[in-house]
């Protein structure tokens, strides 16, 4: 019997005539015999590539072999390759399919449109596939990750948006989060000493994708449902708050964002110290996008927001310090994601200290804190304290003077 996913997709427009000049035949016009041939062809190519790591035969079938069933059916090729991986054990075969797509895209054998429309044709029927394949979104996300991570495919979050056009935003949340998690756990992003990794890579890629709004992939009202107190959760929250900040005049920043947070974000999330990290990152991105100099970061509305969410509630001293330290981690993350702009951290630290947003004790805790918190700081390199000596030396001198006075 032919696998269910290989059967032709019916379309309202399937009866419309096909122009003779069209290079690629749409998926909807394939009969079951042709779909089965493409399925078998793709399965063999996937197995062969997995063993040989060579795309030459695939390139020949897609672009040179006039008798090939996939020669003019690139979207169907992408769709079939993606669906074959659903029956793959282990999941690593899905990554192999993603590597094939990335290489073919970089060599201009596959177009970006063929890939995005082929993947979207699979995601469109997610509700049906999820019944037989509970890990459906995870498998398709594993195909997408190599495309995003490729340095030569030039695939970004805007292209990811096109991959799930038929299901976003209401049904694309789970898929989007799975893609982020696949990137976070990818071997390609682990060695941060040699390249930008993990959550730093995600922030950098998102910034390079021209600040794609979060609600393209997930409605803001789903943040509470899907929020996890981890790096992905903080990333999602920071983008959501930035989206609101960029739509708000600077004179209304505090009132508008505070109102939005109160309406959309649960009290449990706001109570997490990492909430302040997300807020800090959102503020920094908003300042960067407005082309402010570092001296002009954290205007009055920003200061009010940070002060309110750091110490507005009746909190114990350690809880306030924990939130202040998270603010500093937010700056550290953005500095690393932007590949360490000269003077950024130093000037922002001075600003926070002079405006009494962050206490001296919190700066010292951050400086000494080399124990990474599980789920948050695995991406961050050891702090470059040599750059910050001009900030910390005066603090230490002040401490010394205070001790002498006390004695």
Image (tube, rainbow, N blue to C red):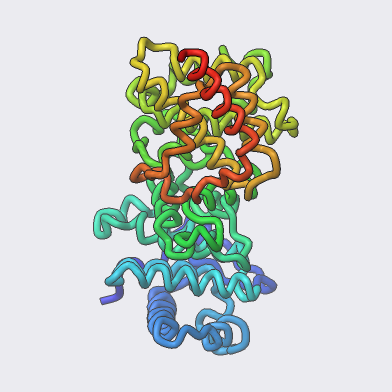
Residue depicted at 52% across the width and 24% down the height: 400
* Quarter of the picture holding the N terminus: bottom left
Relative image position of residue 279 (x, y in whole percent): 51, 28
**Residue 26 left/right relative to 123:** right
Q: How many marks?
A: 0
- The residue lying toward the viewer, choosing from 254 and 103, is 254
**Residue 178 left/right relative to 192:** left
- The residue lying toward the viewer, choosing from 49 and 350, is 350
Residue depicted at 46% across the width and 19% down the height: 310
Relative image position of residue 130 (x, y in whole percent): 29, 54
**Vertical position of residue 173 compared to residue 120: above or below:** above
Which residue is at the far front? 407
**Vertical position of residue 66 compared to residue 85: above or below:** below
**Residue 22 left/right relative to 215:** right
Residue depicted at 43% across the width and 22% down the height: 264
Relative image position of residue 391 (x, y in whole percent): 62, 32
Kindly tell me whether residue 114 is visible in this rendering.
yes
Kindly tell me whether residue 7 is visible in this rendering.
no
Residue depicted at 44% across the width and 12% down the height: 312
- The residue lying toward the viewer, choosing from 24 and 353, is 353
- The residue lying toward the viewer, choosing from 164 and 373, is 373
Q: Quadrant for residue 3, please give it.
A: bottom left
Relative image position of residue 406 (x, y in whole percent): 47, 13
Q: Quadrant for residue 41, please give it.
A: bottom left
């Amino acid at each position: 019997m032919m696998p269910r996913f290989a059967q032709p997709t019916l379309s309202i427009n399937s009866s419309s005539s096909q122009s003779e000049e069209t290079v690629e035949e749409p998926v909807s016009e394939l009969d079951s015999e042709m779909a089965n041939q493409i399925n078998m062809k793709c399965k063999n190519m996937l197995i062969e590539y997995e063993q040989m790591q060579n795309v030459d035969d695939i390139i020949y079938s897609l672009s040179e072999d006039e008798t090939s069933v996939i020669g003019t059916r690139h979207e169907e090729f992408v769709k079939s390759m993606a669906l074959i991986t659903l029956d793959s054990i282990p999941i690593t075969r899905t990554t192999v399919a993603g590597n094939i797509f990335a290489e073919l895209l970089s060599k201009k054998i596959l177009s970006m449109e063929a890939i995005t429309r082929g993947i979207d044709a699979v995601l469109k029927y997610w509700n049906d596939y999820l019944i037989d394949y509970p890990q459906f979104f995870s498998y398709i996300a594993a195909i997408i990750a190599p495309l995003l991570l490729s340095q030569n495919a030039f695939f970004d979050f805007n292209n990811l948006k096109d991959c799930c056009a038929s299901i976003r935003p209401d049904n694309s949340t789970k898929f989007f989060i799975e893609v982020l998690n696949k990137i976070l756990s990818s071997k390609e992003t682990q060695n941060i000493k040699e390249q930008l990794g993990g959550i730093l890579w995600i922030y950098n890629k998102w910034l390079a994708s021209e600040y794609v709004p979060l609600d393209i992939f997930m409605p803001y009202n789903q943040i509470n449902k899907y929020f996890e107190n981890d790096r992905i959760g903080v990333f999602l929250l920071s983008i959501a708050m930035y989206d609101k900040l960029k739509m708000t005049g600077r004179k209304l920043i505090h009132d508008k964002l505070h109102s939005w947070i109160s309406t959309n974000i649960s009290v449990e999330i706001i109570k997490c110290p990492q909430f302040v990290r997300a807020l800090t990152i959102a503020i920094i991105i908003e300042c960067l996008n407005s082309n402010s100099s570092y001296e002009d970061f954290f205007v009055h509305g920003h200061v009010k927001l940070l002060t309110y969410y750091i110490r507005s509630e009746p909190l114990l001293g350690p809880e306030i310090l924990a939130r202040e330290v998270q603010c500093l981690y937010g700056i550290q993350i953005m500095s690393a994601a932007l590949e360490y702009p000269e003077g950024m951290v130093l000037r922002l630290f001075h600003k926070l200290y002079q405006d009494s947003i962050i206490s001296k004790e919190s700066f010292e805790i951050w400086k000494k804190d080399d124990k990474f918190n599980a789920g948050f700081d695995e991406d961050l390199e050891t702090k470059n304290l040599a750059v910050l000596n001009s900030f910390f030396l005066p603090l230490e001198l002040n401490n010394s003077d205070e001790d002498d006075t006390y004695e």
